[in-house]
Image (cartoon, rainbow, N blue to C red):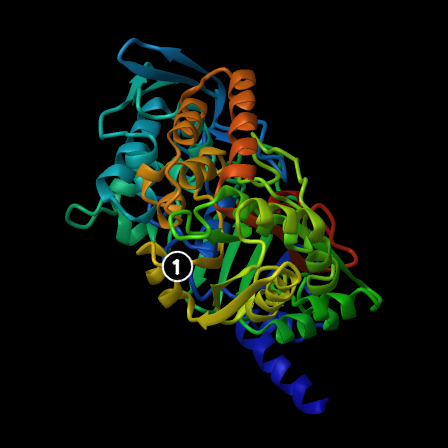
Amino acid sequence: MRIRFVLAMVVIGTLLGPQMSSRAATAADTLVYVNDISDMISLDPAVAYEFSGILAATNIYDTLVAFEGEDLTTLKPRLAQSWFIRDNGSRWAVTLKLRPGVKFSTGRPVTAKAVAFSFDRVIALNKSPAFLFKEVAGMNEGDTIPVGTDTVVVSLPKTASPQAFLSVLTFTVAAIVDPDEVMAHQVGTDRGEAWLRNHSAGTGPYTLDRWDPESRVVLVANPNYWGPKPNLPRVIISHVPESSTQKFLLESGDADIAADLSPEQARDLATKPNVAVQKGKLLQLVYIGMNAKLPPLDNPKVREAIRASIDYDGIIRNLLRGEARKVQTIVPEGLFGFNPSAPFQQDIAQAKRLLQEAGKGEGFSIELLVPTGPAPGGVKWADLGAKVQSDLAQVGIKVEIKETAQAQLLNVYRAQKGQMVMILWGPDFPDPDGNATPFADYDAKSLAWRNQYSDADAAKLAKQAALEPDLMKRQALYRQLTEKVLHEGPYVILYQPLKRFGLRANVSGFVWNPMAFAEFRTVSK
């Protein structure tokens, strides 16, 4: 115990600073959030596309519109106070009117030209998140047009979904940066990228004080923030890769929030004083893909029999200890277009009847590719595979499990060579089209392609739903699509996982956004 204490004090002194290590608890005006931030490569919102970079950038920059808290269905105004979509003949026109009086952290006013600069900059730099503008929205430089100082009109091709574009605008790629400040630090033609990697020029509730790679990010309150001031004026995001160390720092009072707890650690913390456990929603789906062109999986009744054979409740209750939700349709809970229909639970008689109707009453053998390591929700992929193997054996399906490193498994899957593949999927942007097109449209060369699922009606529905500007009609189209793929598609959706956090008991106002970030301005202690 003494060794653990000394090691932890070294970690605290290195990551949180000397002023922290001398105290029994974090400072009253500071939030200390411990997490593995080794994936952070830049805090430039036009570049960041890793979880840690997005977490920090979300708190430094504002977007025109936002999804707040856990709600990913209702767009809220941020830097734009209103917006509307207009059919402009050959293109869509999305008009956004800016909130008056907003200033950057530099003190300069936010203008329509700043919005156009920010969007054009993303496209010109063409870094990882740029595909959301270039491919999802079909945008080019010059498509964002300032109208006066307070209005922008974004011109989109008719092949793009205007509703999906609005969802993209909630993501950090659409953050608005101060063009004067950024261009004052331009090196060559980099549009300020090198400088903005570890500096900030936004309108968010915080500004970047410092970033020590693989050590910590320090945020301080933005004195020019247009909204309610953050409850805590200082945030430290500290690099603590080991969940056991995170737990120790939380229990000792040297961290306020721990982000990477295992199910066992969370259960242990739930019994301790001065700490609490909180769950956060995720948009990932853990599923089995079935190759729809390989016999006997080419028969829809066989695929339906497999869905009817699996003990979903047992997986969630016994393997995941409740750390997941029962979701069986291709749009996850939390997104617009979610269909709560979950008709499948283990029904051995029904599964055997379906196999008999398909001419496979005697059963068959099949290979299941399973990744190595842990799956979302705190279970090992191998244990999840073994449970599915046991369930299918009850109806005469002999499953041979082939455990494979995820990179190798994806190579096989992407080449359409897997028979059954257990894997996960999460959307790149908070819109149902981020799931519907990959799961339903073979020509998108994504999940439907990998499972050789080519259904013209499903692809047509996905396209119609994506392009429909009327929300009620769009909702109805997604209901029709998800019901169709639920029964006819090549997928077994096993569950939608949750994420666990440990919090000091005095911490309140922490809400995890399912797109994998939190807004620290609402947190108090």
Image quadrant in which the N terminus is located: bottom right
Determine the residue located farthest toward the left in the rendered image: 188
* Residue drawn at 62 percent across, 64 percent down: 393
- Could you tell me if residue 309 is visible in this image? yes
Q: Is residue 77 visible?
A: no
Q: Measured from the top left, where is residue 180 in percent x and y? A: 29, 36
Which of 185 and 48 lies nearest the eye of the viewer? 48
Q: Amino acid at mark 1?
A: Gly
- The quarter of the displayed image where residue 457 is located: top left
Residue 35 rendering spot, x and y as whole percentages: 56, 64
Q: Is residue 22 above or below residue 439?
A: below
Q: Which residue is mark 1?
A: 418
Q: Quadrant of residue 149?
A: top left
Tell me the crowding category of disc 1: few under 14, some 14 to 19, or many 20 or more residues within 10 angstroms, Cα based: many
Location of residue 483 in the rendering, given as x and y in whole percent from the top left corner:
57, 32
| 312 to the left or right of 89 | right
Disc 1 on helix, strand or loop?
loop
Image point 42% across, 40% down: which residue? 202
